[in-house]
């Protein structure tokens, strides 16, 4: 069986990496169409995943549309040449359209309700649309709800085992207090009109957290000179080890907030998506499992951060909450592989 993956974001590398590895181990052929966005291609190279870069991230809305057009043409051409039995993607219009052109099934993973444009251009052409059970949109008969999150494809305990020595190799002591901050660029198509932390809030967070231990910043956009000393000192493929042993995660990122929560690290997320109309994953993680705080107001966010760093029992409580979550969720990679074999082998 030949399986084509369309990977446009660093999180998609993690989402699909274990499925790719297991398919290869079973003797199937895989290939990845990649995108030069942040560290996407770096991660693929570090995991020794064969890939073909098709485009680079545009900086504005019309740049993104122009990029999609280029990817559409290139994806269809490669799909015709590769002749896959199945294509997997995360709400990628070019991948869904290419699957129709070459006549193979397309499995779409989607956990972002606000990604309206990509969804409208993708879902009509998909054969199966996989969403978390809490996804707050009914997508019809193609929708397949599963008890998990994208992040449980790689952070489920059956897949992820934290390595403290990987941190010590980079002069980070996992038993010493430290915090992780994540700032994103807000340049995706579904981010138009949205925002995260202001510069003033970032400065305040660094000031507050640096009094409690080391601070490590990972930033999608250019890191201001004043924060350079806090730049992440580890390779990108060790970020989940860093998150697991952290005392606290704070950021305006969607993915990393979920990762921290799933790993049982006290997590605070602040951006304009938060609130009553927030995405299903974040509502569930906060209200049902109490693993995450999501707020729009920066002042309130910093108050929560102060309370958590003064709470000496927070890490132990979060690990217990994590156990409760894992008991109710699935290994998403295993679920993904079952779908690939079901739909891909039928088409061969």
Image: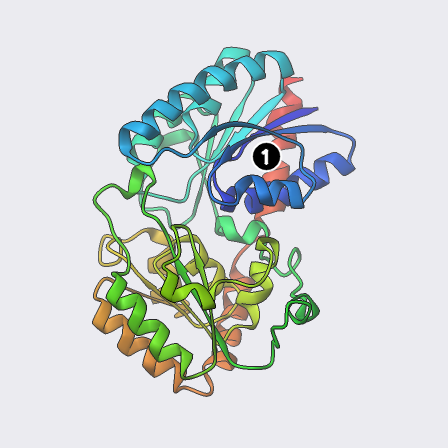
Quarter of the image with the C terminus is top right
Above/below status of 15 relative to 327: above
For label 1, count other residues whose C-alpha is less than 10 Å away and answer few (under 14), some (14-19) or many (20+): some
- List the single residue furthest toward the front: 225
Report whether 240 appears left or right of 133: right
Q: Is residue 225 above or below residue 177?
A: above
Colour scheme in use: rainbow
* Residue 25 shown left or right of residue 144 in the figure: right
The percent coordinates of residue 25 (x first, y second) are 77, 38
Instruction: From the viewer's side, name the closer residue of 204 and 68.
Output: 204
Going 23% across and 73% down the picture, which residue do you hit? 300
Observer able to see residue 144 = yes
At horizontal 57% and vertical 39% (from top left) the residue drawn is 41
Secondary structure under the numbered disc 1 in the rendered image = helix
User: x%, y% of residue 103?
Assistant: 54, 13
Q: In this view, does 235 lie above or below 1?
A: below
Mark 1 lies on residue:
339
Write the residue at 34% across / 52% down: 280
- In this view, the residue in front, 293 or 242, is 242
**Measured along the vertical axis of the image, is residue 311 above or below residue 338?**
below
State the residue at coordinates (50%, 46%). 11
Q: Where is residue 253 in the image (x, y as percent from the top left)?
A: 38, 55
Q: 221 or 292, which is in the foreground?
A: 221
Q: Which quadrant: the N terminus?
A: top right
The reply to whether residue 103 is in sight is no
Where residue 112 appears, as percent x and y from the top left, is 36, 44
Q: How many labels does the image show?
A: 1
């Amino acid at each position: 069986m030949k399986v084509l993956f369309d990977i446009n974001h660093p999180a998609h590398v993690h989402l699909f990496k274990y499925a790719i590895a297991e398919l290869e181990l079973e003797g199937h052929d895989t290939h990845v169409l990649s995108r030069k966005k942040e560290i996407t291609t770096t991660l693929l190279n570090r995991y020794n995943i064969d890939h073909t870069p098709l485009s680079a991230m545009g900086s504005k809305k019309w740049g993104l549309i122009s990029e999609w057009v280029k990817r559409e043409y290139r994806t269809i051409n490669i799909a015709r040449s590769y002749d896959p039995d199945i294509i997997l993607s995360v709400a990628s219009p070019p991948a869904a359209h290419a699957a129709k052109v070459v006549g193979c099934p397309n499995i779409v993973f989607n956990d972002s309700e606000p990604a309206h444009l990509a969804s409208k251009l993708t879902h009509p052409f998909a054969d199966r649309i996989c969403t978390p059970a809490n996804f707050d949109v009914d997508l019809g008969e193609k929708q397949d709800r599963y008890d998990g999150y994208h992040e449980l494809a790689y952070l489920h305990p059956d897949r992820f085992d934290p390595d403290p020595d990987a941190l010590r190799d980079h002069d980070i002591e996992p038993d010493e207090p430290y915090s992780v901050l994540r700032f994103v660029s807000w340049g995706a198509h579904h981010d138009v009109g949205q925002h995260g932390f202001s510069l003033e809030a970032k400065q305040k967070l660094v000031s507050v957290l640096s009094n409690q231990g080391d601070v490590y910043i990972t930033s999608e956009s250019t890191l201001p000179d004043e924060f350079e000393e806090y730049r992440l000192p580890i390779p990108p493929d060790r970020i989940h080890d860093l998150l697991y042993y952290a005392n606290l995660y704070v950021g305006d990122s969607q993915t990393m907030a979920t990762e921290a929560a799933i790993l049982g690290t006290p997590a605070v997320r602040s951006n304009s998506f938060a609130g009553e109309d927030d995405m299903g994953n974040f509502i569930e993680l906060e209200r049902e499992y109490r693993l995450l705080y999501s707020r729009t107001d920066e002042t309130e966010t910093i108050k929560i951060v102060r309370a958590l760093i003064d709470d000496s029992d927070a890490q132990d409580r979060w690990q217990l909450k994590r156990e409760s979550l894992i008991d109710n969720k699935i290994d998403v990679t295993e679920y993904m592989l079952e779908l690939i074999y079901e739909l891909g082998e039928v088409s061969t």
